[in-house]
């Protein structure tokens, strides 16, 4: 919504806003995506997370944890050989400015190019003691399917796009904290559950 509104607002008005209210605060967004080969509900106890702060009807679970705990969790998951650390996107944006992070590739389907991989859209807003982060997270991959042909005709393959994770959420992240999101137990990424870590920090102001 903000990006659509900004397209019709003259640039001088935004510069006037910044001159009156000061420059926007810079926000650094770090993310990591993890594939868990085998993580039953009982295995969550071993991640030191406790009960999730949020869980929805689709099986998504969300924990808000301190930055230090999130860092220790990430280090532990990286050392586990069964886990797949699939992506580590980072972007610097500012208060009220939309940011897009993506890691993936293009594939051709029926002559048209399509992007597959990890895509994250963020809109952060700085509050007094927290960062209000609206996020859309999508993970897709190319899937090859075999078409069974009638007798006497050769079989063929066709490529489609498979969605492994799609989440739209708004997080209230206290300063000094981050987010760990885990999808439902029957999520698909080569048979793995998918976890996403998000860190939103205010880098020190350069003088």
Image: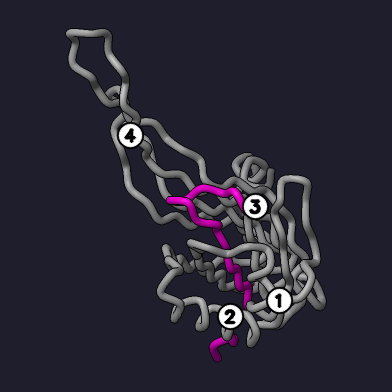
- Quickly name the residue at label 4: 144
Badge 4 or badge 2: first in the primary sequence: 2
* Quarter of the figure that contains the N terminus: top right
- The residue at the point 74 percent across, 56 percent down is 170
Task: Indicate the secondary structure of the residue bearing disc 1.
Answer: loop
Can residue 24 be seen in the rendering of this structure?
no
Separation (CA) of disc 3 from disc 4: 24 Å
- Quickly name the residue at label 1: 49
- Quickly name the residue at label 3: 184
User: Label 3: few (<14), some or many (≥20) within 10 Å?
Assistant: some
- The residue at the point 65 percent across, 52 percent down is 184
- The residue at the point 63 percent across, 60 percent down is 182
205 relative position to 91: left or right: right
Separation (CA) of disc 3 from disc 1: 16 Å
Question: Which region shows up in magenta?
Answer: 184-207
Task: Indicate the secondary structure of the residue bearing disc 2.
Answer: helix
Marks 2,1: beta carbons within 8 A: yes
- Quickly name the residue at label 2: 73
């Amino acid at each position: 919504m903000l990006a659509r509104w900004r397209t019709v607002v003259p640039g001088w008005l935004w510069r006037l806003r910044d001159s009156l209210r000061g420059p926007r605060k810079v926000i650094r967004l770090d993310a990591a995506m993890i594939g868990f080969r085998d993580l039953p509900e009982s295995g969550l106890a071993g991640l030191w997370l406790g009960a999730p702060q949020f869980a929805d009807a689709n099986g998504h679970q969300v924990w808000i944890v301190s930055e230090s705990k999130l860092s220790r969790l990430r280090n532990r998951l990286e050392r586990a050989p069964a886990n797949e650390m699939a992506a580590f996107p980072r972007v610097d944006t500012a208060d009220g400015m939309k940011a897009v992070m993506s890691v993936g590739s293009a594939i051709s389907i029926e002559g048209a190019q399509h992007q597959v991989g990890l895509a994250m859209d963020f809109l952060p807003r700085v509050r007094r003691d927290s960062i209000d982060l609206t996020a859309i997270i999508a993970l897709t991959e190319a899937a090859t399917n075999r078409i069974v042909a009638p007798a006497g005709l050769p079989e063929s393959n066709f490529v489609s796009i498979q969605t492994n994770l799609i989440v739209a959420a708004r997080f209230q992240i206290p300063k000094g904290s981050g987010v760990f999101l885990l999808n439902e137990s029957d999520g698909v990424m080569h048979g793995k559950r998918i976890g996403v870590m998000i860190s939103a920090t205010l880098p020190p102001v350069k003088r």
